[in-house]
Amino acid sequence: MARLNEVYLAGLLYQDPESHETTGTRTPVAVARLVLLEERDGKQVKLLVPLEAWGRSALLLGRMHAGDGVLLRGKLRLANGTLVVSSWNIQPLQPSAA
């Protein structure tokens, strides 16, 4: 059965990710914000999206830095009243050759 809550986003990391481990299971966790850029009424608008990653995706995200491009696959989740993208697959994006 297809997932009814699945999102794909590509953007830039707005800040360096924060990494830690969960207590008990010691599962790696990383959190950051993704900036998505769009044109609205002739002006560029930034949309900041909270992002969390777990396990191997968290280890990869934790090695990235602000400004790095990222492609992610995950789901939307409500955390403390905030909509968050909980990602299970993260891929770094290489800058295109100009």
Image (tube, rainbow, N blue to C red):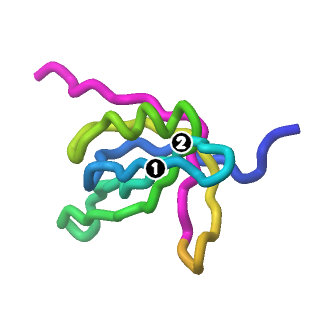
State the image coordinates of residue 54 (x, y, percent, origin top left).
57, 43
Badge 1 element: strand
> Residue 45, located in which quarter of the rendered image?
bottom left
Give the labeled residue for mark 1.
20
Question: Dot 1, how many residues are within 10 Å of its Cα: few (below 14), some (14-19), or many (20+)?
Answer: some
Task: Kindly identify the amino acid type of the residue bearing the numbered disc 2.
Answer: Pro
**Magenta stretch, overall SS:** strand
Q: Is residue 11 left or right of residue 75?
A: left
Instruction: Tell me the distance, in whole angstroms, between the alpha carbons under discs 2 and 1.
Output: 6 Å
x, y percentage for residue 11? 34, 45
Q: Earlier in the sequence, mark 2 or mark 1?
A: 1
- Dot 2, crowdedness within 10 Å: few (<14), some or many (≥20)? some
Q: Identify the secondary structure beneath mark 2.
A: strand
Q: Amino acid at mark 1?
A: His
In the picture, the quarter occupied by the C terminus is top left
69, 58: nearer the viewer: 58
- Horizontal placement of 62 versus 54: left or right? left
Q: Choose top left, top right, bottom left or bottom right for residue 92.
A: top left
Give the residue number, with chain letter if any, for mark 2.
28
Contact between marks 2 and 1 (CB within 8 A): the answer is yes
Q: Could you say where residue 76 lies in the image, as x and y percent from the top left?
A: 62, 58
* Outermost residue, top side: 97
Q: Which quarter of the image is occupied by the N terminus?
A: top right
* Residue range highlighted in magenta: 83-98
Residue 88 lies within the magenta run: yes
User: Does residue 58 lie above or below 20 as drawn?
Assistant: above
Residue 57 lies, with reference to residue 25, above or below; the image says above
Q: Residue at x 55, y 69 (%)?
A: 83
